[in-house]
Image (cartoon, grey):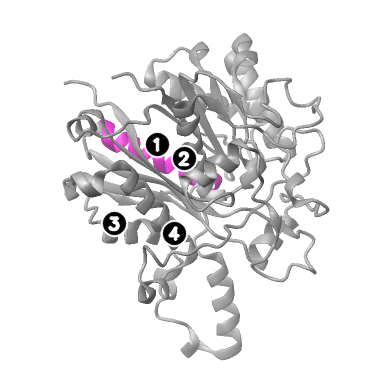
Amino acid sequence: MKERRVVVTGLGMVSPVGNDVASSWKACVNGQSGIDYISAFDASTCDVKVAAEVKNFDSSSVIEAKERGRMSRFCQLAIVATDEALRDSGLKDTGFTPERAGVLIGVGLGDLPEIARTSVLLDKAGARKVSPFFIPYIIPNMASGLISRNYNLRGPTMCTTTACASGTHAVGEAFLYIKSGLTDVMVAGGSESTICPLGVIAFSNMKALSKRSDDPTKVSRPFDRDRDGFVIGEGSGVIIIEEYEHAKRRGARIYAELVGYGLSGDAHHITAPAPQGEGGQRCMRMAFEMSNTPLDQLDYINAHGTSTKLNDQFESEAIGILFGDHAKDISISSTKSVTGHCLGAAGGLEAVFSVLAIHHSLVPPTMNYENQDPDCLPLDYTPAKAKERNIRYALSNSFGFGGTNASLLFKKIEV
């Protein structure tokens, strides 16, 4: 049986740096930060005062008013990103077999703001004030369910909830569905919107967030010596992947090929990564082994790069150990330096950025990398300015709480 290849044919995004793919990519490569003072609530009494919010978000052109009133923000973000991706892919025009098309959107926490609000309402006003729509409003898999319904995707409809690796696991699992012959087309990515007092304070109290606020654009500092925590963000990133022959028959534009997927568990700690990124090493290696790609072929890594002390240190060590002498020749960047950390959506956003890096032969910069951290290996983190480079292979990493790891390996398309 001929091996089934998987290609990327559509991209969609709503992010802290833009409400579509074109504006998000332009801001990302120009180093324009989406991080600012929190506007979702009054954060004046909070230790953390900055976040990476989606600005001026309007879903009215995609979702009817009656539907919007019954739909959480993370679902709306996912639907708008999906609509762009499907239009970009041409599937809306050329059509597809609904039973052979599925959706897998990773979500970390669901609608945390609504959970917090309804809990207070229950305590203050009693049971009758709890909406009958509360459960479908907040559950993480509802983004996939609504996308399935809205776009007649009748194949597998799933949700991965693996903390910060949710979006990357979603794309990886969707990749396996197509490789195995279960589907021909998958809508895959991540979505998240948890910027509320409960979310910010909880992450702050576990000492995960940066508490700087003098210049919001300078707060997220991946791999930099002076980093002190991540910046919470929101958004959605979605890609359309499909079987190569299916895409070719309908004359689709192909951005890149998805050739490898790795996943692993640290079995170490509920929040801290394993020393030297041991689980991340195995995860990255698996993506290369799955695709029979030599490690020395890698050109670019979109790093997990959260701007936290241990994550950045151990990810850099994992890269150095796994790739050996070749590590110094790899371009590395953390786009979280401008988008913040969008939690369950991060892997979806970064998959889009990785594909665009290949498509445009352009490595996005790591902003705010100014002082080398002696605990991080001295690798090429692409500081401050995007770099032109012919990218044959790009790796996107996501490592989440619970010691869960995921990596995606994309390749410049060869027809």
Q: What residue is at 32 percent from the left and 31 percent from the top?
A: 254
Q: Earlier in the sequence, mark 2 or mark 4?
A: 4
Q: Please say if the residues under marks 2 and 4 sit with CB atoms less than 8 Å apart.
A: no
In the rendered structure, the answer to whether residue 391 lies left or right of residue 47 reads left
> In this view of the protein, which residue sits in the foreground, 355 or 192?
355
Quarter-wise, where is residue 225 in the image?
top right
The numbered dot on residue 168 is: 2
Q: In x, y percent, where is residue 111?
A: 51, 65
Mark 4 and mark 1 lie on one chain; the one further toward the N terminus is 4
Q: Is residue 387 above or below residue 207?
A: above
Name the residue at the top extreme. Answer: 325
The residue to which callout 3 is attached is: 148
Q: Secondary structure at mark 2?
A: helix
Residue 235: x, y in percent? 52, 53
Q: Which residues are magenta?
A: 163-179
Tell me the number on the disc at residue 140: 4
Q: Is residue 64 left or right of residue 152?
A: right
